[in-house]
Image (spheres, rainbow, N blue to C red):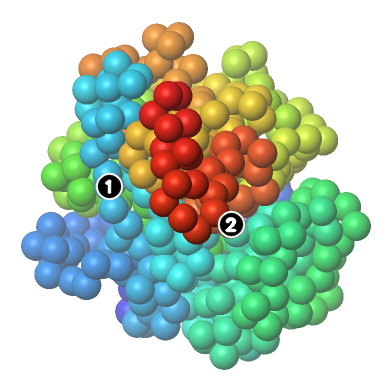
Amino acid sequence: MGFVKGLKCRECGREYSVDPIYVCEFCFGPLEVAYDYDGIKGVLTREKILSRPQNLWRYKELLPIDGEPTSGLNSGFTPLVRADKLGAHLGMKRLYIKDDTVTHPTLSFKDRVVAVALTKAREFGFNTVACASTGNLAHSVSAHGAAGGFKRFIFIPATLEKSKIIASLVYGPNLIAVDGNYDDVNRLCSEVANKYKWAFVNINIRPFYAEGSKTHGYEIVEQLGWRSPDAVVVPCASGSLLTKIWKSFKEMKEVGLINDVNTKVFAAQATGCSPIVAAIKAGVDVIKPVKPNTIAKSLAIGNPADGYYATQVVKESGGFGADVSDKEIIEAIKLLARTEGIFGETAGGVTLASAMKLIESGHIDKEALTVLCITGNGLKTKEAVVGHTGEPYHINPNLKSFEEALEKINSK
Ligand SMILES: *Cc1c(COP(=O)(O)O)cnc(C)c1O
Ligand SMILES: [Zn+2]
């Protein structure tokens, strides 16, 4: 058995038993998983973690499952890349990339949340899984669900990038393209989830699903040699990942894996969909929903479920937020690729471009040990950089033609 005590309302603190539920019946606040940290302390030691396979389940005592994991056995434990070339470009001496562009099997951090959600769905006895997705979640539920033998219903906005639609269909789910934006899809899915008793990973399974994001943070701490960074820059859609990275650092302190947490948490969004950053900048607690208009479709949630909690984490930790234009996103995708050899998707461009603004404005100290969360792979959203990458040198298959091209290259 695990160390889960139950579910707890984030607003009124009322406690619930472990069930596929997500809102408090009394105050409609969101439910969150509560753990017996005293029980975990001394059981989950650094030695125990280091002795386990390099996947996200090495921290399983801090994840909301009762038995052994059944999904995502190869997910997580992505590289923490020391980014000296990019750092030199930005004037940063200790810059790192947490590189979830290579998460197994669908190349985004969503494989973490889905690994936990599907393990829990199986424990609850569901055989159909579903989700409302901005793109990456569709891939991940389609893939993990296929491997786990689940029936799958995947709801997406019909305007999603063509390549993201193909990369979901290939796994053979029931893909439902909704005429509307993500917020419309999400609203529809809440109705469907009420009527059909399926495991909607980011609706009725959300309290468990969201816990998977903590593993991104645990790994950062372990890979830095058991310390939390001075600054972390996190891309925000619903705001869940940001709040869970903070929770992961605090939990590691709580169970005695690290001594203290002095991390400032920074939120990154596209200007075309920045309800969380707008609230942070204005210094208000109320999130004003927006209509998304940005190339960063994976972050395009206009009415973010965890937006309020994300602003509270940023405030509590002493961080801030930045938002960036589509042009800045594209430039940052190229900069990351050219300096570190990492091709991030649009969300990665949002993170790097936002970090650059925060360094420029002095919110991130140049001496700070800083981690940028790069959460998805650029091969999934090639459309975003089409027309911005330059062209190949087109030649005939002979040496003369090559050398003419070489002359052009050398005279550049
Ligand atoms: C979903 C997603 C995020 C952030 O998600 P939250 O809803 O804020 O937890 C970040 N990056 C990528 C690539 C994503 O797909
Ligand atoms: Zn409540």
Residue 169 position by quadrant = bottom right
Q: Compare residues 173 and 65 and report the one nearer the observer.
A: 173
Quarter of the image where the C terminus is located? top left
The spot of residue 345 in percent (x, y) is 54, 47
> Along the horizontal axis of the image, is 58 left or right of 392?
left
Q: Earlier in the sequence, mark 1 or mark 2?
A: 1
Image height of 227 relative to 127, above or below: above
SS for dot 2? helix
Residue 25 visible to the viewer: no
The spot of residue 62 in percent (x, y) is 33, 61
- Label ID, residue 380: 2
* Residue located at (42% from left, 42% from top): 403
Q: Compare residues 329 and 98 and report the one nearer the observer.
A: 329
Image height of 273 relative to 239, above or below: above
> Which amino acid, mark 2?
Lys
* Residue located at (52% from left, 86% from top): 148
> Along the horizontal axis of the image, is 358 left or right of 35?
right
- For disc 1, the marked residue is 80
SS for dot 1? strand
- At label 2, counting other C-alpha atoms closer than 10 Å, the crowd grade (few under 14, some 14-19, many 20 or more) is many
Residue 367 position by quadrant = top left
Quarter of the image where the N terminus is located? bottom left
> Which amino acid, mark 1?
Leu
Residue 406 position by quadrant = top left
In this rendering, the count of numbered labels is 2
> Along the horizontal axis of the image, is 360 left or right of 306?
left
For the residues labelled 1 and 2, the Cα–Cα distance comes to: 21 Å
